[in-house]
Amino acid sequence: MTRRKTSHLPRIPDLIAGLVDPRLHGARCTGRAPLFDAELPDESVESRSARLAWARGQCARCPVQSACRTAAAELSNPSGVWAGTARGLIGRPTTNQESA
């Protein structure tokens, strides 16, 4: 009797699989997305500046930087660090617009 080898890995739902861009396989930001975000809650200006500088440094050594630049250009409103470039909302308003 022959046993068929079956995978014990869960099947990724199509909706989630559709969010993965195969061009970005091997990116240095994989699994570290929040570190590349435009802003994090309760983050000081100095901390954000240091974090984004670190993220840009990771992008400079990334093997898929060109594909990342292309992927960012295809998005309607990219935010955060993409291919070493800060995009979207960077910085906080200089006036208190939240109370308006």
Image: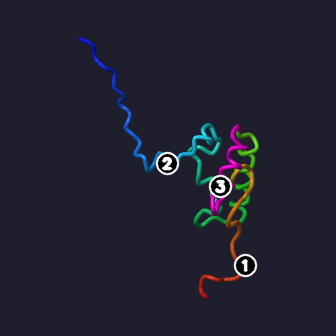
Residue 4 x %, y %: 31, 20
Question: In front of the other: label 3 or label 1?
Answer: 3
The disc at residue 18 is: 2
Please give the residue where the numbered disc 1 appears in the rendered image.
Answer: 94
The disc at residue 74 is: 3
Residue type at numbered disc 1: Thr
Q: Is 47 on the left-hand or right-hand side of 31?
A: right
Residue type at numbered disc 2: Gly
Circle 1 — which element?
loop
Circle 2 — which element?
loop
Residue type at numbered disc 3: Glu
Q: Decide: is 96 above or below 28.
A: below
Q: How is the image coloured?
A: rainbow
Q: Which residues are magenta?
A: 63-81
Q: Is 13 on the left-hand or right-hand side of 83?
A: left
Separation (CA) of disc 3 from disc 1? 30 Å
Circle 3 — which element?
helix
Q: Name which of mark 1 and mark 2 comes first in the sequence.
A: 2
Determine contact: label 2, label 3, CB under 8 Å.
no
**Residue at point 59% right, 86% down?**
99
Picture quarter containing residue 73?
A: bottom right
**Residue at point 28% right, 17% down?**
3
Q: Decide: is 93 above or below 64.
A: below
Residue 60 x %, y %: 76, 44
Q: State the residue in front, 18 or 82.
A: 18
Quadrant location, the C terminus = bottom right
